[in-house]
Image (tube, helix red, strand yellow):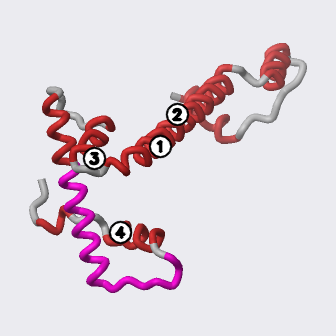
């Protein structure tokens, strides 16, 4: 848990960015107002977390989930935010699913590249073995091979 009450505050940069996005251009906010908004937001987050935790505990779970947060919003009488929160949650899930699929696709592509040997390289190797074509070897590889032979 936090050692000091200030540790529970949201980062000032995040609060400032949210404030700027919410207000029209040209509107300035004093340092004291930003501090007050930051503290209010932190209290709100702690209260919402506490209410959501109560729902999780009622369900005999230790992990809060989205349904706990939505139920907490309703209990705190913030019903008008439930629909936008559900929309944001769905957008987040779609985004995560897209990232997961892209990651799996990259892994599959990488795996298939590693499994499929380069045909031209294979042919050159076969020709080397038959003595028909000799390919220039990397000098460092030759040094390593010579060291292995000497040892």
Instruction: Establish if 73 lies above or below 10.
Output: above
Q: Are marks 2 and 3 in contact (CB under 8 Å)?
A: no
Pointer 1 residue: 87
Pointer 4 residue: 15
Check disc 1: other Cα within 10 Å, few if <14, some if 14-19, many if 20+: few
The answer to whether residue 146 of the structure is visible from this angle is no
Distance of mark 4 from mark 2, alpha carbons? 28 Å
Residue 30 picture location, percent across and down:
33, 86
**Residue drawn at x 46%, y 83% as measured from the top left:** 27
Displayed quadrant of residue 103: top right
Displayed quadrant of residue 126: top right
Q: Which residues are magenta?
A: 24-48
Distance of mark 2 from mark 3, alpha carbons? 26 Å
Furthest toward the right, the residue is 132
Q: Which structural element holds mark 2?
A: helix
Instruction: Establish if 22 lies above or below 134.
Output: below
Distance of mark 1 from mark 4, alpha carbons? 22 Å
Q: Nearer the viewer, residue 2 or 66?
A: 66
Check disc 2: other Cα within 10 Å, few if <14, some if 14-19, many if 20+: few
Instruction: Establish if 26 lies above or below 128.
Output: below
Q: Nearer the viewer, residue 114 or 147?
A: 114
Quick check: 79 left or right of 140? left
Q: Which structural element holds mark 3?
A: helix
Pointer 2 residue: 97
Q: Is residue 47 magenta?
A: yes
Pointer 3 residue: 73
Q: Earlier in the sequence, mark 4 or mark 2?
A: 4
Give the label, 4 or 2, closer to the camera.
4
Give the label, 2 or 3, closer to the camera.
3
**Residue drawn at x 20%, y 61% as measured from the top left:** 43
């Amino acid at each position: 848990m936090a050692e000091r009450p200030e540790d529970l505050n949201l980062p000032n940069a995040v609060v400032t960015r949210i404030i700027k996005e919410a207000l029209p251009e040209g509107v300035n906010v004093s340092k004291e107002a930003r501090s007050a908004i930051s503290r209010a937001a932190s209290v709100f987050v702690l209260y919402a977390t506490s209410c959501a935790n109560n729902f999780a505990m009622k369900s005999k779970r230790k992990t809060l989930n989205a349904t706990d947060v939505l139920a907490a919003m309703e209990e705190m009488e913030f019903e008008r935010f439930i629909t936008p929160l559900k929309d944001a949650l769905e957008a987040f899930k779609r985004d995560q699913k897209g990232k997961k699929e892209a990651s799996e696709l990259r892994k599959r592509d990488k795996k298939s590249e590693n499994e499929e040997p380069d045909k031209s390289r294979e042919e050159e190797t076969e020709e080397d073995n038959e003595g028909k074509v000799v390919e220039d070897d990397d000098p460092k590889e030759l040094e390593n091979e010579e060291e292995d032979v000497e040892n």
